[in-house]
Image: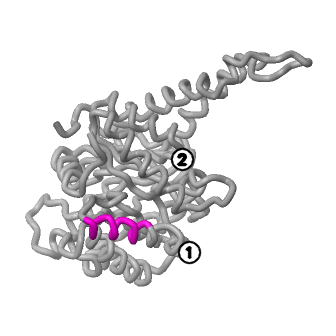
Amino acid sequence: MPIATPEVYAEMLDRAKAGKFAYPAINVTSSQTLHAALRGFAEAESDGIIQMSTGGAEFAGGQYNKDMVTGAVALAEFAHIVAAKYDINVALHTDHCPKDKLDGYVRPLLDISAERVKAGRNPLFQSHMWDGSAETLADNLTIAEELLAQAAAAKIILEVEITPTGGEEDGVSHEINDELYTTVDDALRTAEALGLGEKGRYLLAASFGNVHGVYKPGNVVLRPELLKDLQEGIAAKYGKAAGSQPFDFVFHGGSGSTAEEIATALDNGVVKMNLDTDTQYAFTRPVAGHMFSNYDGVLKVDGEVGNKKTYDPRTWGKLAEAGMAKRVTEACAALRSTGTKLK
């Protein structure tokens, strides 16, 4: 199947909300990690989301000139070709983009998709993220309004982060403290500025103690039940039916989360959960094992010639792909998306 059209992506998100499951959103940095993500989704019979951060796109753009837009466009175009061979639907997304990188990343990509749509084609990406969590909420939402209008015109969904996620990712860092919890007032201000769909669809990365990076269960205090408070606060303000969930939430910083925390988040409207740290390790660990087990083949030890079959990148690359794909299938199971692909 091809990359999801705007209509198919919207249907994917609607089905996730109604079915109380979420799509793993897998960060990729290369054609190989992209294939690993696609393979994992296909083996789980789950649709999914593949995303590129500013750092990931810069890496994909090559170390000669490190151009983020070049890397993102190249990987996206590659995905449009190879995803057709996988029996799933996949949406392409760009991950965290702070204010100082908007002009070098999201805005040019929005322009590219706008031109595609103007020519009668589908957008290159299906969604983009604006990370204004380092700005005041007023400034964050002002920029979000501008980007939402541009995204909607290009048939793209915008993701916004209104309060910080702790830890560090691609140079954006926040302390782990009480500011990591979105309030009902924050949610109300967001709805007032961005609407509830009438100005364009958006995903909301609200904070409930989330932290990027590596941590063990119990080291971070997650409060996914807070998402229910946000949904109820908005529903009451806008006259929605009791139990309705106006927001499509995104779960950031999920490494180390317990099954119970994930389940609560899904029940309260999370439709997308980002995975990067865990899939990075799943990709690298088999490679490390191969190198340690075959050190005298991958290295030309004591003047010997080594063993081409062991240092051939295809040999250890296949192991890396399989390791990451397996972690993606595990994520699908944890997020209840296994077996839910659109027919």
Please state if 290 lies on the left or on the right of 106 as rendered.
right
Q: Name the residue type under label 1.
A: Asp
Look at the numbered disc 1 and give the secondary structure of its residue.
Answer: helix
Per the image, the residue denoted by label 1 is: 100
- Asked if residue 36 is among those painted magenta in the image, a careful observer would answer no
Q: Quadrant of residue 301?
A: top right
Residue found farthest to the right:
302
Disc 2 residue crowd, few under 14, some 14–19, many 20+, Cα 10 Å: many
Per the image, the residue denoted by label 2 is: 29
For the residues labelled 2 and 1, the Cα–Cα distance comes to 21 Å
Q: Picture coordinates of residue 281 (x, y %)?
A: 57, 36
Q: Picture coordinates of residue 41 (x, y %)?
A: 35, 35
Disc 1 residue crowd, few under 14, some 14–19, many 20+, Cα 10 Å: few
Among the two numbered marks 2 and 1 on one chain, the one whose residue lies closer to the N terminus:
2
Image: 284 above or below 204 = above
Q: Picture coordinates of residue 289 (x, y %)?
A: 65, 23
Magenta stretch, main secondary structure, is helix
Please state if 228 lies on the left or on the right of 224 as rendered.
left
Look at the numbered disc 2 and give the secondary structure of its residue.
Answer: loop
Residue visible at 66% across and 60% down in the picture: 65
Image: 225 above or below 297 = below
CB contact under 8 Å: marks 2 and 1: no
Q: Which residues are magenta?
A: 109-119
Q: Nearer the viewer, residue 267 or 286?
A: 286
Residue visible at 32% across and 58% down in the picture: 126
